[in-house]
Amino acid sequence: MDKFLKRQQVPGKRKVDDECTSNITTTTKRRKYDEAYLALGFTSTTVGDEERPQCVVCLKILASDSMKPNKLRRHLETSHHKHKEKPVDFFRKKLLNCRAQQCRFTKAASVPSNAQLASYKVAYRVAQCKKPHIIAEELILPSANDMVSTMIDDATASKLKAIPLSNNTIARRIYDISKDIEEQLKEKIRDNRFALQMDEAIDNCTTADELFKIIDTYLKEADLKWEDCVGICTDGAQAMAGKRGGLQALVKRVSPNMQWTHCMIHREALTSKQTSPELNDVMTDIIATVNYVKTRPVKARIFCALCEEMGSDDTAVLFHSESRWLSRGKVLSRVFELWDEIRIFLEEEGNELANKFQNNNFLMKLAHLSNMFQKLNELNLQMQGTNIHLPQLEDKITSFTRKLEMWEQRVKEGNIDSFESLKSFTEVNKLQNTVIPCMTTHISALQKHFQRYFPVQDPAKYDWIRDPFSARPPADFSTAEQERFIDVTSDSTMRLQFKSKALAAFWIGVENDYPLLCRRALAILLPFATSYLCEIGFSAVASIKTKYRSKLDIENELRVAVPQLHPRFERICSTKQAHPSH
């Protein structure tokens, strides 16, 4: 280690040495290739920005400082001593062969432009269908080859082999496409107003500060300004919606005019969870029944065989998931559809839950819940979509709350026509409806919860946006805005355009002529009313992570991970491979 220590120097000497060193300018002279070097068996090639000698016999590329006759001659005499007396024509032929070989390599490595485009189109289809990347090479390409060879000829089908569709290639193509779409989106919204919708994955909870840092960093990298953000839509979690320490508060510090919206689909889901203790007990028993059947594979197969024997349309019950918007309604509908099969199955199993499915009062409550949650699911589906704005969803909510009032009044009068399953069950079994008080209580509670999560607003608030040619301008319009509104509603050409265009497209189209009205209308239409796009993104990721894992993949993972826990696993897997029917 002594040689790495600083040496003692005479005072003043280091300074002199440094000054002398600073005055020295080193210049490196590089030789250029000369045609005479071909007699020594060398040509030249460019690596980076350097010109280097390349042997035409072994194609070896030497360092740039080897561009000297003596070093080139040394390589020829030591590595190719048999050719050291060869004439220049011999090396000239070698040079021609070398260049021809390079051309062949370049041609083999390059992909035709049409094949490249086809590869991107296939990758786009794979991404849209959320299929595994390997499906392009294992299924799409062979299928296309078969179709072309059958419908046209084998020569044409052979051209498809030039399309690169390997697993890694498809992954790169999808990444390139996504980045290109992202860049196009950034270009469109840069220096324009924009809105955001966001949600966090349930398996990765973070604080409001961390969420804000992530979004702020992305906007800065994309060269987007917080001042241009007119709205943010999130769920109602404290980290998102908190007015003091949540993401809403942090964003409003940098964008005071930003409008925060609690996702209307999440609000609808929250209202549907509120049930009376009486109906909540029914839901608890239903979930317990489903879990008893589904969590035991043997019992699930027995129940499936029972349903097939009884001629049922469906042969399985569905798991309930609190994080799924439509789960509760689907579970209740399927259980009510198979209630007789479930009763027989539970009786054979000796399960005490069978008594529930022998109780007509329990079954009528189940029928009511099935019908009500089916209606709530219909409302939820109407609120889903990509081109949905706030005025549209408020119309849907207003319609449903009015229906709740009508249903409550009809049920009090004994009319249950709107609840088809319950009506059919009571008529077929000739039963008196004994759950009317329970139904009215439930419907009344739903009305209160809808009023809580969706406060009543002036129904004519957005009429000037929905139909400017039939509505009056709002009272808070300025004089200039009222004048422009009169100009728009007096224009017969625009009246025709309004009938043929979508609502947002119409108001965007008047931006050049009437910027004041356009800006005010888009401030309402632009903010997202739901976080639907986030949810379908999470669903796609979850589907790719779980749905397409093959049985063989799972066995391979288990073979690597837990052979020490299951010593018989290797023998079982080998037995299955030898006898697939097992």
Image (tube, helix red, strand yellow):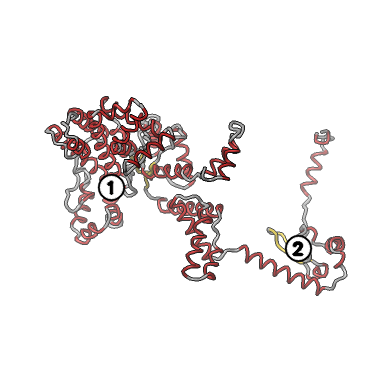
Query: Looking at this view, is 450 or 320 the one in front?
Result: 320
The image shows residue 154 at horizontal and vertical percentages of 53, 69
Instruction: Tell me if 333 is positioned left or right of 20 in this view.
Output: left
Amino acid type, residue under disc 1 in the picture = Arg
Q: Gap between marks 2 and 1, in whole Å? A: 70 Å
Residue 442 position within the rendered picture, expressed as x and y whole percent measured from the top left: 22, 30
Q: Nearer the viewer, residue 168 or 231?
A: 168
Q: Is residue 198 left or right of residue 84?
A: left
Can the viewer see residue 43 in this picture?
yes
Which label was assigned to residue 297?
none
Q: How many other residues sit within 10 Å of disc 2, few (<14), some (14-19) or many (≥20)?
A: some
* Extreme-left residue of the structure: 413
Query: Of label 2 and label 1, which has the lower sequence position?
Result: 2
For marks 2 and 1, give the one nearer the viewer.
2
Q: Which residue is mark 1?
A: 520
- Answer above or below: position of 83 versus 288: below
Q: Residues within 10 Å of mark 1 (few under 14, many from 20)?
A: some
Q: Residue furthest bottom?
A: 89
Q: Position of residue 70 (x, y in %)?
A: 86, 62
Using the image, tell me which numbered label, if any, was put on residue 59. 2
Of the residues shown, which amino acid type is indicated by label 2? Leu
Indicate the secondary structure of the residue bearing disc 2. loop
* Residue in the picture at 22% in, 28% down: 361
Give the number of callouts: 2
Could you tell me if residue 267 is visible in this image?
Answer: no
**Closer to the camera, 123 or 310?**
310
User: Residue 534: x percent and y percent?
Assistant: 40, 43
Q: Quadrant of residue 169?
A: bottom right
Tell me whether circle 2 and circle 1 mark residues in contact (CB < 8 Å): no
Dot 1 lies on which element? Answer: helix
Q: Quadrant of the N terminus?
A: top right
